[in-house]
């Protein structure tokens, strides 16, 4: 029997879940409070990142966070505030930031990222889509010996996980990127990574899902969830009531606002990230991460994107010009002769990444409701983990064998 599935959230996680669910014969409805044209799924760096094996809650991040707390232009900024949810999240983050917990998370993060890359390639090869996808790896560019040593430690750990990683000189970087005029001491090169143009993929996926009969209700906010015994019976929006056999909350940074209505607490903090695009020729052909500045550089389809910063300051739509300027300044610091213009800086946009305390996403059912699934908390890996999360959601709902062990992603796990 076909299941009626209501998905709350039309970002990369919601769309990929709909993609796999409709293949299982489910009748899918997506509700999104926006017009599905902006947000974290559109402004991200477009990375598929097996290289990103270390979660945000790494040892030393709390010290860095405290150091940067009063610098609004720093790569990782935490706005000091007496907010109960934030303080609980911060305490869980502190408990997660141990060497043993990070070590345990590494293979889990790598495995789901590798699955993500495989699934993106399967979607590309299906013949149903025509989106930009390239696997050129990722250059971790550094300017100081200290940063290079730290990055190579990560590289060596990644090698133990089976990834191909090389520590290369500035001359070797120049051979790989002859037209980019990169100023660096060296780089750690991961050949495992791929990159895409997010807006392109999102548009193609929406079009495909509509053709397959998926219903979209945009500019509608979920106001209430009607409960009967241990199940959600109806989803009430500002405009309609929808019956549901299964409900998926994939609303990113807004997910806790919905789960709170159900008495389910999912620790998530919104981590704001910014992006600046340039349509000028940059000579950049390989994605790079500017290590000291924590800025991602991606050659997308017809333009180059510079994205970065992690600003934990709650849900808000304020663009901080200091943070935009910091990204712009780092570009000219690493790429000689490349300066972003004031006009380009003025087009900067942002997205709110949903961050869990331990760096692992929430994927799975809750104990309280038999037909509620959570898929959120993907932080900076949301783009990379869209397809594997969607596939896992479809397997959960269809009672199929799971592609991965989802115990580490349990929405009600203890911190």
Image (cartoon, rainbow, N blue to C red):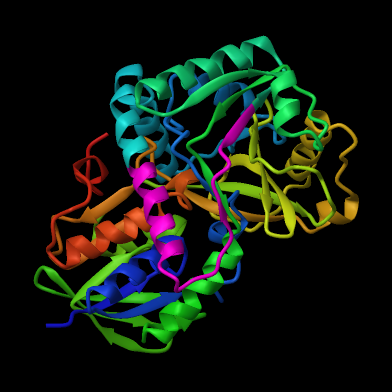
Can I make out residue 64 in this image? Answer: yes
Q: Which quarter of the picture shows residue 81?
A: top right
Q: Nearer the viewer, residue 260 or 323?
A: 323
Residue 236 percent location from the top left of the image: 33, 81
Q: Nearer the viewer, residue 406 or 373?
A: 406
Q: Nearer the viewer, residue 38 or 197?
A: 197
Residue 79 percent location from the top left of the image: 59, 38
Q: If the image is split into quadrants, where does the C terminus sit?
A: top left
Q: Residue at x 28, y 26 (%)?
A: 104
Q: Residue at x 29, y 60 (%)?
A: 391
Q: Is residue 86 left or right of residue 148?
A: left
Q: How many marks?
A: 0
Q: Is residue 230 left or right of residue 203?
A: left
Q: Residue at x 70, y 22 (%)?
A: 172
210 up-or-down from 85: above or below: below
Residue 314 percent location from the top left of the image: 53, 49
Q: Nearer the viewer, residue 255 or 383?
A: 383
In the image, which residues are magenta? 112-140
């Amino acid at each position: 029997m076909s299941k009626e599935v209501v998905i709350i959230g039309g970002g990369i996680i919601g769309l990929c879940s709909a993609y796999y669910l409709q293949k299982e014969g489910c009748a899918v409805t997506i509700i999104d409070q926006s017009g599905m044209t902006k947000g974290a799924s559109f402004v991200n760096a477009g990375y598929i990142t097996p290289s990103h094996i270390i979660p945000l809650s790494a040892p030393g991040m709390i010290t860095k966070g405290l150091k940067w707390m009063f610098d609004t232009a720093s790569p990782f900024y935490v706005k000091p505030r007496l907010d109960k949810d934030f303080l609980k999240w911060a305490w869980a983050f502190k408990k997660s930031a141990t060497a043993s917990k990070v070590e345990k998370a590494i293979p889990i993060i790598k495995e789901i990222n590798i699955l993500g890359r495989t699934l993106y390639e399967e979607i590309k090869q299906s013949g149903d889509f025509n989106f930009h996808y390239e696997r050129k790896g990722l250059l971790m560019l550094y300017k100081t010996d200290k940063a290079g040593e730290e990055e190579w430690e990560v590289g060596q750990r990644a090698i133990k996980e089976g990834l191909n990683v090389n520590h290369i000189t500035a001359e070797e970087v120049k051979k790989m990127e002859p037209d980019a005029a990169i100023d660096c001491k060296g780089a750690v090169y991961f050949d495992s990574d791929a990159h895409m143009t997010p807006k392109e993929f999102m548009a193609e996926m929406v079009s495909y899902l509509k053709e397959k009969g998926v219903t979209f209700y945009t500019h509608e906010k979920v106001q209430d969830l009607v409960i009967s015994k241990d199940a959600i019976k109806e989803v009430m929006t500002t405009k309609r009531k929808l019956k549901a056999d299964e409900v998926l909350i994939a609303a990113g940074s807004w997910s806790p606002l919905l789960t709170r209505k159900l008495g389910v607490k999912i620790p998530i903090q919104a981590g704001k990230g910014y992006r600046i695009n340039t349509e000028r020729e940059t000579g950049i052909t390989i994605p790079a991460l500017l290590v000291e500045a924590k800025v991602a550089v991606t050659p997308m389809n017809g333009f180059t994107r510079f994205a970065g910063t992690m600003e934990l300051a709650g849900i808000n739509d304020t663009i901080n010009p200091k943070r935009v300027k910091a990204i712009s300044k780092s570009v000219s610091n690493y790429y000689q002769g490349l300066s972003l213009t004031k006009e380009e800086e003025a087009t900067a946009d942002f997205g709110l990444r949903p961050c869990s305390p331990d760096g692992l996403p929430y994927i799975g059912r809750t104990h309280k409701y038999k037909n509620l699934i959570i898929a959120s908390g993907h932080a900076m890996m949301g783009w990379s983990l869209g397809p594997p999360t969607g596939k896992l959601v479809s397997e959960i709902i269809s009672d199929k064998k799971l592609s991965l062990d989802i115990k580490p992603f349990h929405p009600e796990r203890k911190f």
